[in-house]
Image (cartoon, helix red, strand yellow):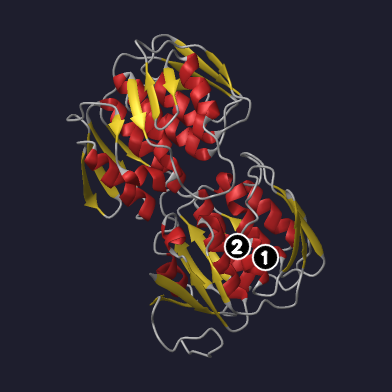
Amino acid sequence: MEKIIIHGQKPLHGEVVVSGSKNAAVAIMPAALLANDIVILENVPDIADIKNLVQIMQEMDVKVEYLDQHTLRIDSRYMHNGCVDSELVCKMRGSYYFMGVLLGRFKHAQVAFPGGCDFGVRPIDLHVKGFEALGAEVNTKTLIEMKARELVGTNIFLDVASVGATINIMMAAVLAKGTTVIENAAKEPHVVDTASFLNSMGADVKGAGTDVIRIRGVQKLHGSEYAIIPDQIEAGTYMMASAVTGGDVTITNLIPRHMDSISAKLREIGVSVMERDESIRVVGSEHMKPTKIKTLPYPGFPTDMQPQMMVLLSMIPGTSMINESIYDSRFRYVEQLKRLGAKIDVEGHIAVIEGVDQLQGGEVQATDLRAGAAMVLAGLAAEGSTIISNVGYIDRGYEGMVDKLTKLGACIDRINDDDPGIHPAEDHAC
């Protein structure tokens, strides 16, 4: 096991390139199996979740090879059934996309329950509702087992604008008979990107990015070459890194429109945010003011940026508030941040933050993917040294985070868990 050690209070400067979107890639890779053909995917992030997906697909008799670090060739012509037996399915939330894909292609699917970060109850009932509406019989006693004589398009209203359910139903419906209409659909960028990819293979999906998506079923999909969009949350994390360190960082290879809610809040706080065609420059400020935030589905403030924003608000004089409206237990990381001197009170879905003059280095752990990123940001801002454990969470969604931050001037490194003689209070020189 490894840890990350950070010696803080070094303003970040320079340019950082955003990798491909994790949330888009974990949907698009399974979606490639709908084609029964060869698919080339570009701008694939080099992260642990993608490597797990590659292994799962290889165990399904899919030929997957890297053409380079960020380009995958996926050949699914040798698949013969809709079963996913890999234990890796239980380690990542995005594995549930195999449900819609296998049901769509084979009209039957058998998939283990998905895993991923623990934010409390994260049911798949909306997915099941959609599959059943299309004509599938679903059994969820031990595994997720589905079968259908044929899938037939219908109108499906989602009680909640669920990203996973929207994408899963969309993927099952592209090969269904007739037209499927998804109402109250999620609008996130990776929903749009998945729809664009499906269309590149010959699907007929319209309305992605709005709350009504129409899918006219086709008989067959074909191979495609497709580039995945940049990662909205990675970009936002580096925007926050510049803000918490009082730095001057330009984040490139992003889509500024995807960052609107994050940019707006940073500007409201007093941070300078300057947009260009495919980049954003963020300059920290000594004069920031507290604010209130409520996480919402896109285009609202993303729940995946809530922990990173919490770090910044914990350093701003005055009282700030975060209302987490998406997940029940997403504040579990707060106890770790309090170890570094943050003053945060949580009651239900509300966190009240009293800004402190200075965070202090210490030992913390990543409790989930985005909480891990927040611990890194806190370590960058804190006085002294910070050691972060459970960094495997961070590897699930951030490509080369330590290297990227090092190039921006951070004093950060990965160390072995059993490395003797390292203590967070020590004053190491970079």
Residue 62, x across and y down, in percent? 21, 37
Residue 250, x across and y down, in percent? 52, 63
Residue in view at x 59 percent, y 46 percent: 120
Q: Count of labels shown?
A: 2
How crowded is the residue under tag 2: few (<14 C-alpha within 10 Å), some, or many (20+)?
many
Kindly identify which residue carries mark 1: 312
Residue 24, x across and y down, in percent? 44, 41
Determine the image quadrant of residue 106: top left
How crowded is the residue under tag 1: few (<14 C-alpha within 10 Å), some, or many (20+)?
many
Q: Amino acid at mark 2?
A: Met
* Residue closest to the eye, 23 or 389: 389
Above or below, comparing residue 125 to residue 243 in the picture: above
Work out whether mark 1 precedes mark 2 in sequence or the reverse, and give the earlier one.
2
Q: Is residue 42 left or right of residue 27?
A: left
Q: Do the residues under discs 1 and 2 have CB atoms within 8 angstroms?
A: yes
* Residue closest to the eye, 286 or 164: 164
Residue projecting furthest to the right:
318
Location of the N terminus (image quadrant): bottom left
* Residue closest to the eye, 283 or 32: 32
Kindly identify which residue carries mark 2: 240
* Residue closest to the eye, 387 or 265: 387
